Amino acid sequence: MQIGELAKQTGCSIQTIRFYERKGLLDKPSRTEGNYRLYNKAAADKLTFIKQCRALDISMKEIELLLAQKAEPKQSCASVNQLIDKHIESVDEKIYELSQLKNILQSMSAKCSDNKTIKDCGILNALER
Amino acid sequence: MQIGELAKQTGCSIQTIRFYERKGLLDKPSRTEGNYRLYNKAAADKLTFIKQCRALDISMKEIELLLAQKAEPKQSCASVNQLIDKHIESVDEKIYELSQLKNILQSMSAKCSDNKTIKDCGILNALER
DNA sequence: TCTTGACCCTATACGAAGTATAGACATTAT
DNA sequence: ATAATGTCTATACTTCGTATAGGGTCAAGA
C-alpha cells in the first residue's frame, strides 16, 4: 500500500509517517518505479504500535527501546515493565506539579475580581512578588 | 547593572534574558561604551514578573498581554482575571488528560510482570491494539 | 494526445521555550 | 603584558510534529 493508504489506516498524517522514517522509528520502505513508498502489513502494525505509545506520551527515544525489545521475543520483558513503571512515575510527577500550580493560580484568582483597576489588581500584584 | 548581575538577582540565565529581549518581552536595554547591556530596577522587576508567570506556566504570548495591561493602570483588570481563569481551566484539562493516561498505563502495567518473555509481555501486547 | 486532478516526492521553515556552542570583543586583575 | 572574567552576536540543537514550496507520477477524460 502507498503512504496515503497507510495514513488512512493508522490515523497518522503522511508528514508524520515520513517524519518517523527520517527519525529511524520506521524502516525505509521499498519504492515503486516512480519512487513512491510501498508498505506492507508489518509496517502498518509497527506504526500502530508507535501511535499507541505516543498516545500514552511515551517519547520516541523510549519507543525505540521498546521496538528493539520487541525484536527479541525470547528475552525477558523486565525492562519493558521498568520502562512503563518509570513512565507512570513521571506522569504522576507532572500531575502533582500541575495540581500545585493550580492551587497557586486559584488562590491568586481569589485575590481579585473583575471590577478592579489594573493598578489594584490582586493578580498582577501577586505576580510582582 | 550588567546582565550577569541581573541573572543572579532574578535566577534567570543570561541566555534566557537575551532570549526574552529578542522575543520582545523585555525592552532593549541601554548599552555601555563596550556594548554591554545595562539594566535598572524596572527591568529587574519586569523580569521577575515574567519569571513568576513562567513558573505558573503562563505562555510568553499571554505574558505579553499581561504586560500590555500593566502599562495601563487605570483600566479594568477584568481581562486579567479572565486570562487567569482560562489558564486554570487549561491546567485542569491537562491534569485530567494525564490522569486518564495514568489509568491506562497502570492497567497495562498490571497485565504483565518481570518474569515473562517479550513474546508474552502483557504490556507490549496491549500496545499492539 | 493533451490536460486535469489526485497522489506523491524532497527540502526547508516554523512553533514553544529555552539551552548550548563558537568565535570574537571588553574589562579587570596580576 | 597577559591571563581571567564577563560579555557580545550568530547559529544550532532539543521535541514532535505541522506546513509550505516546487516539483514528479499516474490514471482518466476530452
Image (cartoon, coloured by chain):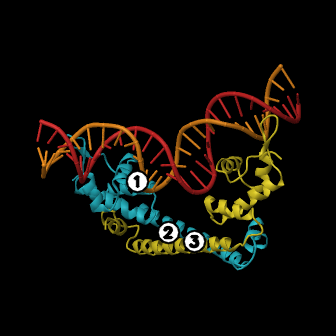
Chain colours: A cyan, B yellow, C red, D orange
* Residue count near mark 2 (Cα–Cα under 10 Å), binned few <14, some 14–19, many ≥20: many
Disc 3 on helix, strand or loop? Answer: helix
* Host chain of mark 1: A
Find residue A46 and report its horizontal and vertical position in percent: 31, 57
For this rendering, which residue is in front, B23 or A97? Answer: B23
Image side of residue B57 versus residue A2, left or right: right
**Which residue shows up at 71% across the image and 75% down it?**
A108
User: Going from the N terminus, do you reach mark 1 or mark 2 first?
Assistant: 1
Which percent across, then down, holds residue C18? 63, 52
**Counting other residues with Cα less than 10 Å from the Cα at mark 3, is it few (<14), some (14-19), or many (20 or more)?**
many
Residue A92 pos. (x, y %):
54, 71
Q: Which of the two residues, B86 or B126, is positioned nearer the viewer here?
A: B86
Q: Are marks 2 and 3 on the same chain?
A: no
Q: Which residue is mark 2?
A: A88
**Residue at image location 70% in from the left, 61% down from the top:** B68
Amino acid under label 3?
Val
Left or right placement of residue B60 versus residue B35 in this view: left
Q: Residue at x 71, y 65 (%)?
A: B69
Please state the chain letter of the residue tagged with numbered disc 3 in the rendered image: B
Gap in Å between the C-alphas at discs 1 and 2?
18 Å
Q: Which residue is mark 3?
A: B91
Q: Amino acid at mark 2?
A: Ile
Work out whether B79 lies above or below B65.
Answer: below
Q: CA distance from mark 2 to mark 3?
A: 19 Å
- According to the picture, the residue beneath numbered tag 1 turns out to be A64
